[in-house]
Amino acid sequence: MSLLDDVARRDSWRCWVCDEAVDADMSVNDPRGPSVDSRTADKKAKVTERLAHRACNTRKGAVKVVIAWPDRLHVVEPAPLITVAERLERKGGRELVARCPSRKDAQEAADWLVDRFSRLVPGLPVTASVDAGGGQYLVALAAGRR
């Protein structure tokens, strides 16, 4: 078995950058084809290789990777998720990641974040909370150290 197959199975054939499916039958030379990405230069990271589309992997070499928040979520001042993931992975703790106008909006964002982080940082137990404050709702992520 190849490194690509091992990494792809572990990541459920989903690109860690865009979170879309990667086609196992696509050529590795195709922009939507599979590639193994060395996600981090941090030697202490538990997972250093991740599955990415060839184009996502190539693009991240030229620009800093940004994990997009879905347009369907109503969030104000969303945190940069790569930075949040790196801090939670390194130190654990709790981070405020967004403000929302309603409890429903905040809960939708919290649910999406827990799901997204399960693939972004596999094996890191992440929970989300929604707290009212100042006429808005704050969404926080919390993680324990591995």
Image (cartoon, helix red, strand yellow):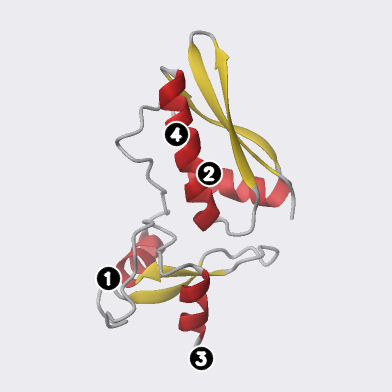
Ranked by sequence position, the earlier of labels 4 and 1 is 1
Question: Which residue is rendered at x = 29% and y = 81% of the image?
Answer: 25
> Residue 73, percent across and down?
35, 32
Is the residue under label 2 in contact with that under label 4 (CB below 8 Å)?
no
Label 1, on which residue?
A: 32
Ranked by sequence position, the earlier of labels 2 and 1 is 1
- 79 left or right of 25? right
Q: What residue type is labelled 4?
A: Ala
Distance, label 4 to label 2, CA atoms, is 9 Å
Residue 114 is labelled as: 2
Residue 1 is labelled as: 3
Residue 51 is at least partly visible in this image: yes
Is the residue under label 1 in contact with that under label 3 (CB below 8 Å)?
no
Distance, label 2 to label 3, CA atoms, is 31 Å
Ranked by sequence position, the earlier of labels 3 and 1 is 3
Q: What residue type is labelled 2?
A: Val
Residue 78 is at least partly visible in this image: no
